[in-house]
Amino acid sequence: MSTVSYPMADTATMLRRNLRHALRYPGLSLGALGMPVVMILLFGLVFGDTFSAGLGGANGGFDYIDFLTPGILLMSIASGTMSPAVAACMDMTEGIVARFRTMAIFRPAVLTGHVLGNVILTIVSLALVVGFALLIGFRPNASFGDWLLASGLLIALTVALTWFAIALGLTSKTPEGASNVVLPISLLLPFLSNTFIPLESMPSGIRWFAEYQPFTPIIDTLRHLLLGTPMDNGDGWVSLAWCLAIAVVGYFWSQKNYNKGTVA
Amino acid sequence: MSSLAIDVRGLRKSYGDKLVLDGIDLNVAEGTIFSLLGPNGAGKTTAVQILSTLIAADAGEIRVAGHDLHQNPEEVRAAIGVTGQFSAVDGLLTGRENLIMMADLHHVGRQVGRRRADELLEQFDLVEAGQKMAMTYSGGMKRRLDLAMTLVGSPRIIFLDEPTTGLDPRSRHNMWLLIRQLVADGVTVLLTTQYLDEADQLADQIAVLDHGRLVAQGTPEQLKRLVPGGHIRLRFTAPEEFALAAQVLPSAAQNEESLVLQVPSDGSVHTLRSLLARIDDASLEVDELTVHTPDLDDVFFAVTGQPTHDTTDEKVTSK
């Protein structure tokens, strides 16, 4: 005799809950949506000319906005990880999770609801960035298939980073702390990558970090897909491997944090 | 054995080197209210958290609703409902949405879930508030919504951790009515409280918990029998009146220093009337008369060994 579990139904219930939260308490989600748009406008319109002049054609002869957009897409994903990390941590500090844990519901549903909710918000944010980029001169030459591949890669990275951010958020005792522990994801990875400038123009120490961190090969792959720039043969696979690795670590780590001390 | 809703033997739990539960045994019969009574820090909440599968015990055999808690936690979860000390409602959802979320998690179906939510809003006097976000609720409303959420899944066993702490007297009384109703419907309730009158009012069985140990267990009546019986206390101002009274009432215990007599009594009106008649007959000038019936306060302080409290619960009739 065993209780039937309802993974899909329970996850859907939790997703509904999180989407309602996003509507009722829009501060976090609006911030996450607005920041990348500000970035694309700021760097595309204000700093763009200076940056391309300084690079002197090192960006492969493309308009700076074309060079910039793929990186800003990753930046939206990265800055979007803060709200699920904070939300998951906030859940734990309130009694509601204690209630969920004493109910016969599909265990991973609570966190999966956060992840799915954030994937939906991030897709909106990515669409906004692409929209504004197109408005100020982004001209990709990608086929439909390329767009599909690029979208798939972006969503895979969103899922992976969100799980990882939630795991980090759950290690923190307060929501304020949770917003700090994800800073390396939301700031370090996008800035210390080839988002704004090519690797060749970086100082050697930072360049070494940028070369081996996950964002750089993913940005290269996106540029290849959307603009047809040349890329190293393995970059696509390296990108997927990074997504998979981050997702697996993030998933199991967050489940472990969520179930800490409880009866499995 | 099958009629036990909760069966615990040798339950132990410590946090680091702090022992919180030191091997307690509990037997709760189906369809009864069982109260864990104890001061703050006695281990009540920890016991509830363990029995509701929230945290793991260090040792002990635990069966809840007939299922071994360590082997079948999911079966236990399907049978129980928990209302904790800190409100477990989603503040950003409305009361109705909170209830519907619970119904969804119990997979009762959309129609049934909505109907159940509306019934509970009605029953818990939250119909109007049901459309507002729960974070705007008062303490009593939150507590009612909390209990209503627990009831959505029609649990057979309900854990209530200090359900009335922080409530005003009226909300408290309403909560008591609701709890009695639950048991009338055949549900088993395990209730923790630090209020002696609450345990006395509600519980069929009481276990007194102190520093992680059960120091007494029984019905309210059995526990009251643990302390010396009731008495009527007579205080005099004049030593000669006191001496005279001591002659008239030879069964009374005497305290010459404070001029107090304690006459053994079962607290009934009949014995009180006959005592008053004897006082009148002897024309005694009594300064103060108090009737003292043993209550759980006496039990509590007797078994936990804490200093005797002020006799605030006595009914005082001053002359």
Image (tube, helix red, strand yellow):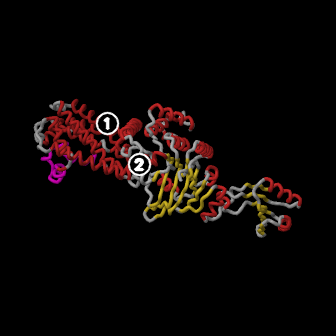
Residue at 14% from the left image edge and 46% from the top image edge: A199
Residue at 78% from the left image edge and 56% from the top image edge: B318
Say which element carries label 1. helix
Q: Where are the magenta residues, as a range? A: A185-211
Figure check: A229 above or below B71: above
Q: Position of residue B105 (x, y in %)?
A: 43, 40
N-terminal label among 1 and 2: 2
From the viewer's side, name the closer residue of A252 and A60.
A252
Check chain identity for marks 1 and 2: say if they share one: yes
Chain to which mark 2 belongs:
A
From the viewer's side, name the closer residue of B310 and A236.
A236
Q: CA distance from mark 1 to mark 2?
A: 22 Å
The residue singled out by tag 2 in the image is: A92
The three-letter code of the residue at mark 2 reads Met
Residue B319 seen in the figure: no
- Tell me, for residue A120, which label it has, or none: 1
On the rendered image, what quadrant is the C terminus of chain B found in?
bottom right
- Determine the image quadrant of residue B316: bottom right
Chain to which mark 1 belongs:
A
Mark 1 and 2 residues: CB-CB less than 8 Å, in contact? no
Residue B214 seen in the figure: yes
Q: Is residue B182 left or right of residue B70?
A: right
Q: Which SS does the magenta portion mostly show?
A: helix
Residue at 10% from the left image edge and 39% from the top image edge: A230
The three-letter code of the residue at mark 1 reads Ile
Q: Residue furthest bottom?
A: B257
Q: Position of residue B182 (x, y in %)?
A: 57, 43
Say which element carries label 2. helix
Decide whether residue B205 is among the magenta residues: no
Mark 1 surroundings: few (<14), some (14-19) or many (≥20) residues within 10 A: some
Q: Position of residue B251 (x, y in %)?
A: 80, 65
